[in-house]
């Protein structure tokens, strides 16, 4: 689909069409963009369970009509019991990727919903929480068709997940692999959502839901306790900011890689590239990515342990000039560099008042730790597997430490009055896909849907891949690809519209009130608008 959807009253985009419609229905019921984002996110936790859930983390970027930009960090920290000694006592020299020992950080998503709704209620009385969660609760209780991507992921990961507590019963009922179109139910999750609607979202951390979560986690052998849940809270902090020609860019502060996303675009703004998708364009963005990732992997993690402030590099024009000048316009710099992984969902909402939300939530790997808590039906994340067991090392495991996150929701304000929110899932690919979408649309005037649909690339790995080559969808001009190889890039072709390239989306509000949206044909999503 290359036609860009347009409307004026409200718009939602997400990687699943039922979730987009759930958000739009909240807008139609008089809800704000914040309430619609919670509705969309809650529905995604049910209809897209391989990519997200209420047992994960989330980050919000909110662009207010008065020009303010604020963020919510709903990232959970490592359990008080989670240290190197805990894992070595279990005979391990690394944190396992799956199972109860991989569930070692608090799930922050629901706390982010709670803070977002408190912001919304400061604007207007708001909808009842049960109304906001209505569609998610319905799909959990009454069932939802399994998507082709969920069926494929379950097939690919069955060997490593089928013996994880609770996974087979929930996602492989009767021991059979799901097929696209099968109806998936999660009545235990429906009960949990109903409890949250009745008792309030704080019950996830302080009430009956928290006690059930903690009991299940303890029984399964996770280091997480009720005290860890009770100690958690979402935090509000300023957005990172970078200025380029014609626009101000915004993203999340650490522990996310938002600074890398902004660095790529700030460096590319200094490079010569006359046309989208030609050699100068692709080479320039790839080389800017290398510079940004080196900075990220040297400096970024839990801000409590960082020795630099991420905003400082974005404000230092001379440092940015030096990084850009280090890029050879004809030759690829050496690679690889250590890669990050991860899977997630991004969603965007703009309401009729011009309030715009860019929101991202994740379980880390597909299906996270794989454990499905028996009392609540919650799939718990494995974000803490990114920790190393050397507490002095980069992203080293320490009790109470936040893990490094690939998640980063993006936004922009243009000099002509446009507001844009955009983002994607895809681990290492998130900053790169953001750069592709934004630069095509903003610098070269490519229509929004075309900017999302156009072929993409990925330096590094995602979706559990070990390859760190420069992957490209087989829709680029072959002459461009040959020039990239000649410049020294290790090129690896992947199929067109590959899910390896993420599930992206974008929304733009013009000063006139016109809304434009885009969803990703690589996903199961759509733009829902009125």
Image (cartoon, rainbow, N blue to C red):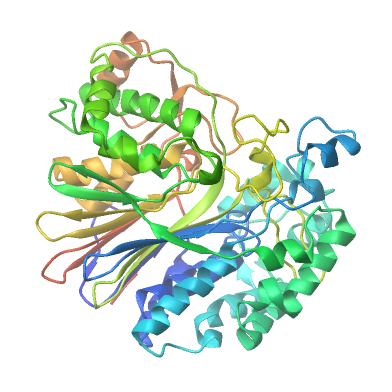
- Nearest the viewer among 134 and 405 is 405
Q: 104 left or right of 131?
A: right
Percent coordinates x, y for residue 406 in the rendering: 50, 43
Q: Can residue 15 be seen?
A: no
Q: Nearer the viewer, residue 256 or 45?
A: 256
Vertical placement of 443 versus 130: above or below?
above
Residue 379 found in image quarter: bottom right
| Image position of 13 with respect to 338: above or below | below
Is any part of residue 194 visible from this angle?
Answer: yes
Q: How many marks?
A: 0
Of residue 437 and residue 217, the one placed in the foreground of this image is 217
Residue shown at 41% from the left, 51% from the top: 252
Give the residue at x 61% y 36%. 395
Which residue is at a point 76% across and 38% down the rendered structure image? 95
Q: Can you give x and y, in whole percent of width and height, for residue 484 in the image? A: 32, 16
* Quadrant where the C terminus is found in the figure: bottom left
Left or right: 200 in relation to 160: left
Q: Position of residue 394 (x, y in %)?
A: 59, 31
- The image quadrant that residue 178 belongs to is bottom right
> Which image quarter is the N terminus in?
bottom left
Give residue 280's position: percent from left, percent from top: 21, 23
Q: Is residue 511 toward the left or the right of residue 78 in the image?
A: left
């Amino acid at each position: 689909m290359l036609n860009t959807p347009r409307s004026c009253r409200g718009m939602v985009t997400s990687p699943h069409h039922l979730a987009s419609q759930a958000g739009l229905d909240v807008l139609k019921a008089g809800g704000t963009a914040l309430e619609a984002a919670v509705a969309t996110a809650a529905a995604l936790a049910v209809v897209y369970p391989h990519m997200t859930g209420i047992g994960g983390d989330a980050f919000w970027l909110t662009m207010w009509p008065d020009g303010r930009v604020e963020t919510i960090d709903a990232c959970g920290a490592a359990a008080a019991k989670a240290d190197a000694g805990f894992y070595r006592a279990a005979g391990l020299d690394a944190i396992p990727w799956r199972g109860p020992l991989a569930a070692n950080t608090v799930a922050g998503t629901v706390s982010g919903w709670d803070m977002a709704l408190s912001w919304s209620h400061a604007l207007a009385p708001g909808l009842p929480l049960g109304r906001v969660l209505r569609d998610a609760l319905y799909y959990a209780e009454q069932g939802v068709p399994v998507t082709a991507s969920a069926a494929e992921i379950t097939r690919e990961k069955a060997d490593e997940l089928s013996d994880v507590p609770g996974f087979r019963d929930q996602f492989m009922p009767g021991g059979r692999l799901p097929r696209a179109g099968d109806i998936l139910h999660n009545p235990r999750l429906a009960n949990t959502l109903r409890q949250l609607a009745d008792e309030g979202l704080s019950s996830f951390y302080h009430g009956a839901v928290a006690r059930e979560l903690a009991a299940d986690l303890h029984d399964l052998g996770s280091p997480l306790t009720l005290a860890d849940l009770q100690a958690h809270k979402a935090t509000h902090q300023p957005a990172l900011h970078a200025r380029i020609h014609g626009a101000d860019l915004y993203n999340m502060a650490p522990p996310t890689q938002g600074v890398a996303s902004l660095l790529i675009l700030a460096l590319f703004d200094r490079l010569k590239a006359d046309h989208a998708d030609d050699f100068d364009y692709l080479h320039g963005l790839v080389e800017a990515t290398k510079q940004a990732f080196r900075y990220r992997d040297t400096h970024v993690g839990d801000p409590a342990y960082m020795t630099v402030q991420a905003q400082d590099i974005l404000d230092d024009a001379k440092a940015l000039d030096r990084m850009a000048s280090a890029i050879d316009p004809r030759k690829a710099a050496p690679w690889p560099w250590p890669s990050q992984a991860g899977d997630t969902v991004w969603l965007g909402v703009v309401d009729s008042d011009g309030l715009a939300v860019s929101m991202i939530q994740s379980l880390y790997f597909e299906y996270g730790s794989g454990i499905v808590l028996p009392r609540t039906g919650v799939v718990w994340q494995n974000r803490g597997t990114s920790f190393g067991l050397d507490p002095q090392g980069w992203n080293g495991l320490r009790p109470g430490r936040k893990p490094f996150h690939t998640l980063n929701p993006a936004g922009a304000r243009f000099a002509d009055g446009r507001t844009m929110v955009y983002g994607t899932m895809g681990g290492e690919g998130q900053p790169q896909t953001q750069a592709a979408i934004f630069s095509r649309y903003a610098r070269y005037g490519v229509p929004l849907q075309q900017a999302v649909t156009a072929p993409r690339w990925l330096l590094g790995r995602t979706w559990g891949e070990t390859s760190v080559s420069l992957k490209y969808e087989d829709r680029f001009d072959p002459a461009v690809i040959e020039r990239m190889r000649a410049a020294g890039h290790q090129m690896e072709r992947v199929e067109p519209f590959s899910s390896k390239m993420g599930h992206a989306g974008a929304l733009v509000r013009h000063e006139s009130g016109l809304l434009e949206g885009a969803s990703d044909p690589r996903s199961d999503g759509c733009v829902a608008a009125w």
